Amino acid sequence: MPDSPPVGRRERKKAATRQAIADAALELFLDHGFERVSVRDVAERADVSTTTLFAHFPSKEALVFDREESIDAKLTAAVRERPAGQGVVEALRAHALTSWVSIKSDPRLDRFTALVDGTPALSEYAERMWMRHAGTLSTVIAEELGREVDDLACSALARFALEIPTLAKGRHDPRATVETVFDLLVHGWQSQIEPGGAVTGSDED
């Protein structure tokens, strides 16, 4: 695979500005609440104009989910650029272990989750975003497997995989949670049941 072309100065500056805006927005929203902070407040904190802010983010809600586009790109790459001989499910497992597990170490995670869950506009935006990611992933899986775009199995796999960050929330060992869920996908429910009806891979507090 050829190396990616080097990122130019203009692109680096654009990315830095976007990151500065996103960082300023999250800091203000976490400290004061989403509704009490205006777009102008964010622009002033990031030292940009509101015009520049909207050139990077189409809405106030989008400021909170600044990685939305990169998530779609990474999900697509995880499936399409997987190593030869690796199945789609295992490619998604590898992606989850490298991308989603690390999120658990972010010290702002609990406050971020509370912000989104406690703000109806953000909760609704997050749900729509989740559906877009599911649609993207489902389409990519279907294309890779040579199936119809609306294939039910591909849609189910995409949605199940994207639920993993939620399933891992609040558990002591998110890596073990990811492994258990993907083992379930690969081997089925019966493999999770021990003789006597006990469920393997549980993460009890």
Image: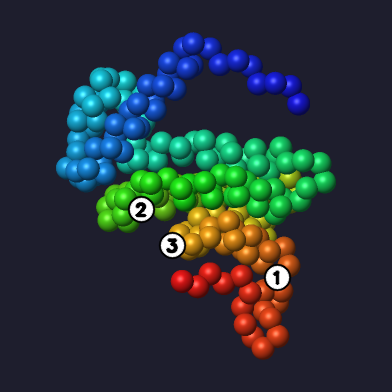
User: Sequence order check: which comes first, mark 2 or mark 1?
Assistant: 2
Q: Residue at x 78, y 47 (%)?
A: 86
Looking at the image, residue 73 sits to the left or right of residue 121; the answer is: right
Mark 3: which amino acid?
Answer: Gly
Most distant residue in the top direction: 9
Q: Which mark is residue 94?
A: none
* Visible residue check, residue 133: no
* Mark 3 element type: loop
Disc 3 marks which residue?
A: 170
Disc 1 marks which residue?
A: 188
- Does 113 sit above or below residue 195? above
* Mark 2 element type: helix
* Disc 2/disc 3 C-alpha distance (Å): 10 Å
Disc 2 marks which residue?
A: 110
Mark 2: which amino acid?
Answer: Asp
Mark 1: which amino acid?
Answer: Gly
Looking at the rendered image, the quarter that the N terminus falls into is top right
Determine whether label 2 and label 3 are within 8 Å by CB: no
* Mark 1 element type: loop
* Disc 2/disc 1 C-alpha distance (Å): 32 Å
Looking at the image, residue 162 sits to the left or right of residue 88; the answer is: left
Looking at the image, residue 113 sits to the left or right of residue 5; the answer is: left
Residue 134 or residue 181, whichever sits in front: 181
